[in-house]
Amino acid sequence: MEILLVDDSSADVELTPRALRQDALTNCLHVARDGEEALSFIYCREPFGERTAEPLPQLILLDLKMPKVDGLSVLRTLKEDPRTRAIPVIILTSSNEEKDVAMSYDLGANSYIQKPVDFGRFRETVHTLAFYWVLFNQAPPRQTLTAMPEKTG
């Protein structure tokens, strides 16, 4: 299972992989520290120009409040592109603002989870969501970025 974690919090970037690897719920976890880096990773742009587009992440854990490109912009880009639209995107953020929840679902988020502040609850939340998405959810067919020409604009 290829998972992309997009989060600018050092603590969450440290804790999330631990929670996922504790029960062997992921084979490969990639981390992007902001939305710009996430889009560069997915679309194989610099500094990831040498990366092959195959495979695309099978799950994206996306924070909303990040520098450069925020999570809602990343979500919008992914869900507007036919090549990445089917990738499940889980919003995992500290925001509990109703407008963020509504906008996330309007843009095509598959789930919205507010990050617990307590480490134990955070670990359990990440474990539970990964358990569902990795073991129970029927994943969409794999797509590649080379299946269609890159979007411009």
Image (cartoon, rainbow, N blue to C red):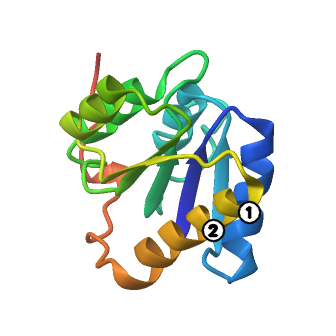
Question: Image quadrant of residue 135?
Answer: bottom left
In this orientation, which residue lies closer to the viewer: 139 or 144?
A: 139
Task: Report the residue at 47% width, 52% height from top.
Answer: 60
The amino acid pointed to by label 2 is: Glu
Residue 34 in the image, given as x and y percentages of width and height: 61, 29
Q: Which residue is mark 1?
A: 120
Instruction: Find numbered disc 1 in the image and state the secondary structure of the residue it sits on.
Output: helix
Task: Report the residue at 24% width, 46% height from top.
Answer: 148
Q: Quadrant of the C terminus?
A: top left
Disc number placed over residue 124 in the picture, else none: 2
Task: Report the residue at 74% width, 63% height from top.
Answer: 120
**Disc 2 from disc 1: Cα separation:** 6 Å
In this orientation, which residue lies closer to the viewer: 58 or 136?
A: 136
Question: Is there CB contact under 8 Å for labels 2 and 1?
Answer: yes
Question: How packed is label 2: few (under 14 Cα within 10 Å), some, or many (20 or more)?
Answer: some
Instruction: Find numbered disc 2 in the image and state the secondary structure of the residue it sits on.
Output: helix
**In the shown orientation, is residue 129 left or right of residue 115?**
left
Q: Is residue 47 above or below residue 137?
A: above
